[in-house]
Image (cartoon, grey):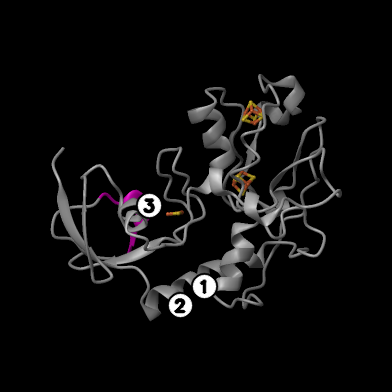
């Protein structure tokens, strides 16, 4: 296959044109943060945490949704990018319950990891917060949309990998959440409770019920299969 050469953070990278900047960076060990990206699914480009600078581009570009081109020069970790990422993290945290002490996903939460990495303790932003009812309408999966960051990974894995398509975004704007048709319980949809929609959730928006309260996943199980990061 045709090869392209680009420069990422000073590293010369040779890869194929079907790669995104994020994938090409990871091939050479350069980590660009991500939340809505999942290597098993098509790029979604929703969270913007993966923004990078590309010389000659008119603005910052999402690394997960931008294909590499020959001669590209990319910077992934400038002070300006880190400042913007901190703001994105703060905005996400401003609408989170921040109950990490008892959250089933603490220690296995990509948003928590990013807050740690970027030194975000508090959010400067305050505003209306969601207070959804926790959905435990089946024996296996609990959904707590107060923790949902609308990354769409649960929706997309069910549709693109499992080929079922139980969820889609319902409602608009501030009220948007992943939901079932007519908000039916999962047991009244084609859902087979197979479970892959739980593992990619980067927060505690969707968790497995059986181990709830009986111990969190071991850190060595953390999201490797789900994130590809
Ligand atoms: S349990 Fe399986 S079928 Fe049900 S929503 Fe999740 S991925 Fe889709
Ligand atoms: S429930 Fe989790 S995986 Fe689904 S959209 Fe919300 S944050 Fe993403
Ligand atoms: S990981 Fe690229 S936009 Fe979310």
On whether ligand 3 comes within 8 Å of the CB at mark 2, the answer is no
**Residue 21 percent coordinates (x, y):** 30, 55
Instruction: Answer few, some or many: residues within 10 Å of disc 2's Cα (few below 14, many 20 plus, some between 14 and 19).
Output: few
Residue 186, given in percent of the width and then of the height, sits at 73, 27
Q: Quadrant of residue 139?
A: top right
Eye-nearest disc, 3 or 1: 3
Q: Residue furthest right?
A: 213
Tell me whether the residue at label 2 lies in contact with that at label 3, contact meaning CB atoms closer than 8 angstroms.
no
N-terminal label among 3 and 1: 3
Q: Residue at the location (26% across, 49% down)?
A: 67
Q: Is residue 152 visible?
A: no
Is residue 228 at all visible to an observer of this figure?
yes
Name which quarter of the figure residue 142 lies in. Answer: top right
Residue closest to the eye, 129 or 6 = 6
Q: CA distance from mark 3 to mark 1?
A: 19 Å
Q: Nearer the viewer, residue 61 or 175?
A: 61
Magenta highlight range: 60-67
Q: Is the C-beta of the residue carrying label 3 under 8 Å from the nearest atom of ligand 3?
A: yes
Question: As rendered, which of 215 and 41 lies closer to the eye?
Answer: 215
Label 2 sits on a secondary structure element that is helix
State how far apart marks 2 and 3 are (Cα): 19 Å
Look at mark 1 in the image and give the residue it sits on. Answer: 87
Q: Which residue is mark 3?
A: 64
Instruction: Give the residue number, with chain letter if any, for mark 2.
Output: 83
């Amino acid at each position: 296959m045709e090869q392209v050469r680009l420069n990422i953070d000073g590293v010369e990278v040779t890869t194929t044109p079907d790669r995104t900047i994020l994938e090409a960076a990871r091939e050479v060990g350069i980590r660009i943060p991500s939340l809505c990206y999942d290597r098993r699914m098509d790029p979604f480009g929703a969270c913007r945490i993966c923004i990078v600078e590309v010389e000659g581009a008119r603005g910052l570009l999402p690394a997960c949704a931008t294909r590499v081109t020959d001669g590209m020069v990319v910077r992934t970790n400038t002070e300006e990018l880190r400042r913007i990422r901190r703001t994105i993290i703060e905005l996400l945290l401003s609408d989170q319950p921040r109950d990490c002490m008892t959250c089933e996903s603490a220690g296995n939460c990509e948003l928590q990891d990013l807050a740690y990495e970027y030194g975000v303790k508090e959010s400067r932003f305050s505003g209306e917060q969601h207070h959804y009812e926790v959905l435990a309408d089946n024996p296996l999966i609990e959904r707590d949309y107060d923790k949902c960051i609308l990354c769409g990974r649960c929706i997309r894995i069910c549709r693109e990998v499992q080929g079922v398509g139980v969820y889609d975004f319902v409602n608009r704007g501030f009220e948007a959440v992943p939901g079932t048709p007519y908000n039916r319980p999962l047991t009244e949809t084609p859902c087979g409770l197979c479970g892959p929609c739980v593992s990619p959730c980067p927060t505690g928006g969707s968790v497995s019920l059986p181990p709830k309260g009986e111990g969190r996943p071991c850190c060595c199980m953390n999201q490797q299969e789900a994130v590809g990061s």
